[in-house]
Amino acid sequence: MGEQMQFIVEKLNQEPFRKNYNLISFDSLEPLQLLQLLSDVLGEIDSKHAVDIREELPEQTAKRMLNLLGILKYKPPGTVSDLSAFRQGLVTGSKTVIHPVLHWLLQRTSELKTRAYLARFLVKLEVPAEFLQDDTVADFNKQYEELMEAFKNLHKEHEQLKISGLSTAEIRRDISAMEEEKDQLAKRVERLKKRVETVQNHQRKLEIARQHRLEKEREESLAQQKQEQKSQLFHAEQRLQRAQVQLKEMQHVVADSKPESLMKKLEEEINFNSYLVNEKIPREMESKKTSVYFLQKVVAEPAMTQADLTALESEIEEVNAQINQLTEKRIITYEPTDSKFSMYRQQASIISRKKEAKAEELQAAKEEMSSLEKQVEQKNSQAHELGGSEVLTEDEFKQYVSKLRSKNTFYKKKRQEIAEITAECGVLQRTEELLRQRHEATQQQLQAIEEKKGISGYSYTQEELERVSAVKSEMDEVKGQTLDNMSEMVKKLNAMVAEKKASLAPVIKELRQLRQNCQISEVLYKDMINSEGKLEVAEFVNSVCSKQRAKGWDL
């Protein structure tokens, strides 16, 4: 306890309180001064509570402090049964109640400031369910919840930015770096402009590039508009589906009913609503008003002690006894035992109670039906968002169940066939294993007989010979096929050689003649070189030609 008071005094002597207390002066504070000190601390956390408690009633002060402590999630020490004592001590300014509250508040002032600030925007207003049946109220409530969620997200981002905030020096460095980068970009733009000016038709090309950029931006904006229109179309389809479902339900109701039944249902609904408006709701309002009046009266009264409560309980018992006596006197005086009205009154009271109970059950059933309809709409929207199909109607669900049953029958049939095949496979495997065992036993017996007869390995050698002969026959067959292929290939090559010889015969004949001419020309050329060179070339040619003619050559 001393450490607690020491901590409170130290915190109160610091900023922003500056109280200049010591342990003795703090411990000697009056209850009203303690309440004012608690109000000042709460006012530091939430500015709305910075008030002078002398200007408000004690009940208002206690209510205000309890409300803020509830928002700050303060849990009083002790069990739940001590809550009344906590409230009583808060009203009277008890040290045993206020000191722990001050210690808790001063330990976490900055955190509680944030919580009090957020409470102004995040404490949700509870709207009664009957008011939410109105579409306008429901839309406003939904918009209110969306704004609350948006505020939460923005506050989280703000706190993260505060935590990860840069210092002034870092910001200046970033600004100087960005300015240098800006200068570099400006120089680069100037260089690019100079390079572009040397290009032919650069203005036209720049205009085309500008138009291309504008078209790109327009394409992005159109894509965004397309996405928005898709979302709008999706929401419109959802509304259309809900309207179609409602239309189907109404058509189903109309198809299955007659005008008389519809009128009867409307009359029942009108009677029920008129009962609620004329009897049930006014009675409940009167009871609520009465309870509120008594509660306000209790709140306005000063704090009661245990002796006051005992006196009130005894007074209540006396009044109840007087009421019972007066009731008995009235029954004896105005209602003789042979009166028939008492029976009718009892029946009427029983019927009225049953009527109230049924009305409450009907109201609860309607509320449950509306909540279930909302859940169905939410599930439908979630199914559409996840790419699922529509929720099946009763007939479609029956058809789907019948299809599942037929598929289940087909599945069971195939499963039975698989089980039979599996069993047969197991039998065959077992048979194969038995036959293998028999074969191994027979082989062992055969080997034993061969050893006894002195021809050990005969069966194995015979099997090997049969296998080798089979392999040899296969190889001979392959070789024969290969030889046939080779003979056919030789025939084809011979035919091709013959064709080539036939086509080359005239060429060879001409080549022979040309070779003879070439030899004669070489001889003549050598004779011309060996001559003394006195004759002219023309004469030499003429002489050669005459010699050739004399020999009978055709020139």
Image: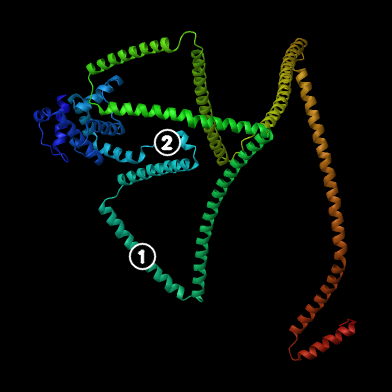
Q: Nearer the viewer, residue 291 or 545?
A: 291
Q: Secondary structure at mark 1?
A: helix
Where, by quadrant of the figure, is residue 115 drawn?
top left
Measured from the top left, where is residue 88 in percent x and y? 23, 24
* 63 with respect to 7 (left or right): right
Q: Which mark is residue 300?
A: none
Specify which label sits upstream in the sequence, 2 or 1: 2
Q: Is residue 319 visible?
A: yes
Q: Could you tell me the amino acid type at mark 1? A: Gln
Give the labeled residue for mark 1. Answer: 184
Q: Residue 13 in the image: x percent, y percent? A: 13, 36
Residue at (32, 62) in percent of width and height = 179
Which residue in the protein does label 2 denote?
127
Q: Is residue 277 above or below residue 327?
A: below
Looking at the picture, which amino acid does disc 2 mark?
Answer: Val
Real-space Cα distance between discs 2 and 1? 61 Å
> Residue at 48% across / 32% down in the picture?
277
Q: Is residue 516 left or right of residue 348?
A: right
Q: Residue at x 10, y 28 (%)?
A: 28
Quadrant into which the C terminus falls: bottom right
Q: Position of residue 42 (x, y in %)?
A: 23, 36
